[in-house]
Amino acid sequence: MLIDTHCHLNFKVFRGREEVMINRAQAVGVKLFIVPGADPKTSQQAVMLAQKYPSVYAAVGVHPHHAVQHPGGVSELLDNLKTLILKPKVVAVGEIGIDLYQYEQTKYLDYKITPEFVKAQEQLFVTQIKLALEFNKTLILHNRQAVEVLLPLLENNWDQKLKNRTVFHCCEADERLLDFAIKHHIYIGVDGDLSWSKKKQRFIKQVPLEKLVLETDSPYLTPLSARKEGEPNLNEPKNVILICDLLAAFKEISSNNVATQTTNNAVSLFGLPG
Ligand SMILES: [Zn+2]
Ligand SMILES: [Zn+2]
C-alpha cells in the first residue's frame, strides 16, 4: 500500500473528477490521500472531501502566497481555520510556510515579494504553527527559496510535540533543511521532480529512508514518465507509484522496501489508523 501525502484534490482543476482520481489511484495500490488546504476555501473543500471519502484525510491552512489577501485580517482567518480544524479527519495544519520565489504568473495582478509581504508571511506562519500546537495537529511545511527565513522561525517556535509530526513537503535539495530535519525528527517529502532534477537525485541519496514520505503535489510536478506530448499532463495521485520506483532506483533498493517504509512513515507522521 502507498499513501499520497500531499495532493490537491481540493483544487478547481479536479472538480467533479475527485472520485475518478481516487479510484484510479486505488486500483494501482495508492490507498490513502492527504489533501492540504492553501486558503480558507480550499481548506474547506479538503474537509468536505475527507467527509465524503473514507480514504481522504484533510489538512487546513493558508499558503504563504495568500498571506495578504484576507480582508478580515489574521484574526478572522484564524477563527475560520479553528472551525474547520475541529471537523473529523483533519490531521494537519498545512500547507504553511514561507515562499520568496518571484512567480511570473499568479492569479494576483501585482505579485511582488515586498518586505511587507514577507512580514505578513512570517506572521501567518507563526500563527499557524501555534494553531497546530493548540489542536495537536501535524505540520505540513511549504518552503520555496526561503530557508534563511523559514528555519529561524521554526527553531524559535519549535515544540517537542512537533517531533515526528512535521514534514518539509516537496523539500528543496538543501543540506540545511536536511540537518534541521535530522535534528528535530522532521520528515522529507519527495515528488515527481525527482525524475528530472539532478540536484534532488543527489540530495535524496543522503536522506535516510526512515525520514522520507511520498507525495505527488497533484496537479503539479508530473513525473516525466507520465507525460505525453500534446496533453495537459496534470499530475494525479496514482503517480505516487512512479515516485516510489524512482526513489527505489536512486537509493538502489527494492520498490517494495520503499513502499513499506514510506507508508509506515506517513502513518506515524499523520497519526493515521495503522
Ligand atoms: Zn507547497
Ligand atoms: Zn501543495
Image: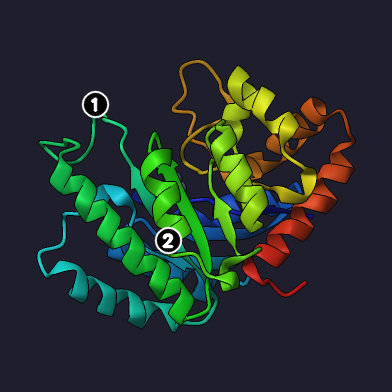
Element marked by disc 1: loop
Nearer the observer, 122 or 109: 122
Nearer the observer, 267 or 130: 130
Nearer the observer, 32 or 110: 110
36 to 171, vertically: above or below: below
Residue 240: image tag: none
Residue 104: image tag: 1
> What residue is shown at x 23% (from left), y 36% (from top)?
106
Question: In this figure, which residue is indicated by the disc labeled 2?
Answer: 156
> What residue is shown at x 89% (from left), y 36% (from top)?
254
Quarter placement of the N terminus:
bottom right
| x and y percentages locating residue 174 in the rendered image | 55, 32
Element marked by disc 2: helix
| x and y percentages locating residue 72 in the rendered image | 12, 70
Label 1 Cα crowd, 10 Å radius (few <14 / some 14-19 / many 20+): few
> What residue is shown at x 35% (from left), y 55% (from top)?
38
26 to 198, vertically: above or below: below
